[in-house]
Amino acid sequence: MSPIETGRVKMHPRWYFVIKAALYLVGIILGILFLLYLVSFIIFIFYQNNVWLLPGFGLRGIREFLVALPWVLIFLAILFVILLEILVTSHNNDIIRPLIYSTMGIIVLAVVGGEVITTNHFHKSLFVRAQQNRLPFAGGLYRYYVMPRKRNLIIGDVSAVLNNGYQIKSLNNDIFTATVVPKTRFPLGNIFAVGDKIIVFGKSEGNIIEAFEIRKMTER
């Protein structure tokens, strides 16, 4: 009451509050949509480049996993979570409880929504258009993150058994040569035949990858 009695409260017409509420709602909706796009794109990168498999190859795999993470996109997603949290709680006097629940809700919404968008092949169709140079705005983004110059992990079918390795046809129908060296590990056995689906982790130069470890792909 003190600001009212001293005349420090300004009166506003109804349209002022209507526009303010509308802008507030539009900001939340746009923030959620952009966050869903970012999270679904990160998940798509994980699936397309098989990044999620790298930690299973020990310390070297964990190091490659950390290097392969799209850190810029991850930091942007975290920034949008913070911005959404500020918008959601800006008109609420109860700060502690909404801060916990609303943040958890935003994160769950982003992850579940991102997974749904990814499984609906939204990014897959955009990636195909980017490969064909038919995506003018985000084409460079898809080519940079989803078409890395070096692929240190290859999944594919053995198309030929060579004297010092294997020729592999990847899931994208690219042909790679996996060379076996003395330090190459075979934790699940080293007998592979044409048609076997294998995972090769190593150091790549072009379409040749020096294998650190080769495993046969299992159902799990």
Image (cartoon, grey):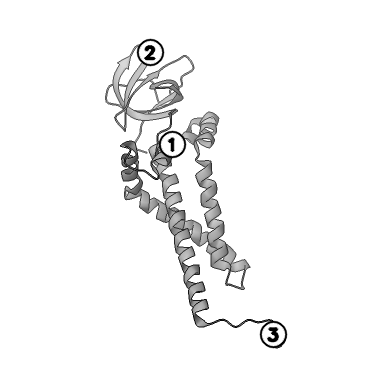
> What count of labels does the image hold?
3
Q: Characterize the local packing of mark 1: few (<14), some (14-19) or many (20 or more) Cα atoms within 10 angstroms.
A: few
User: In the structure shown, which secondary structural element does the residue marked by tag 1 occupy?
Assistant: helix
* Residue of label 3: 7
Which quadrant would residue 176 be assigned to in this image? top left
What is the C-alpha distance between the residues marked 2 and 3?
Answer: 87 Å
* Residue of label 1: 144
Which mark is first along the chain, 1 or 3? Answer: 3
Residue at the far top in the pictured view? 163
The amino acid sitting under disc 1 is: Tyr
The amino acid sitting under disc 2 is: Asn
What is the C-alpha distance between the residues marked 3 and 1?
Answer: 58 Å
**Image check: 98 left or right of 1?**
left
**Image check: 211 left or right of 169?**
right
User: In the structure shown, which secondary structural element does the residue marked by tag 2 occupy?
Assistant: loop
Indicate which label's residue lies in the foreground, 3 or 1: 3
Q: Give how far across and how far down residue 118 sits, in percent.
A: 36, 48
Q: Give how far across and how far down residue 187 sits, in percent.
A: 44, 25
User: Which residue is located at x 47 percent, y 68 percent?
Assistant: 25
Quadrant of the snapshot with the N terminus: bottom right
The amino acid sitting under disc 3 is: Gly
The numbered dot on residue 164 is: 2
Indicate which label's residue lies in the foreground, 2 or 1: 1
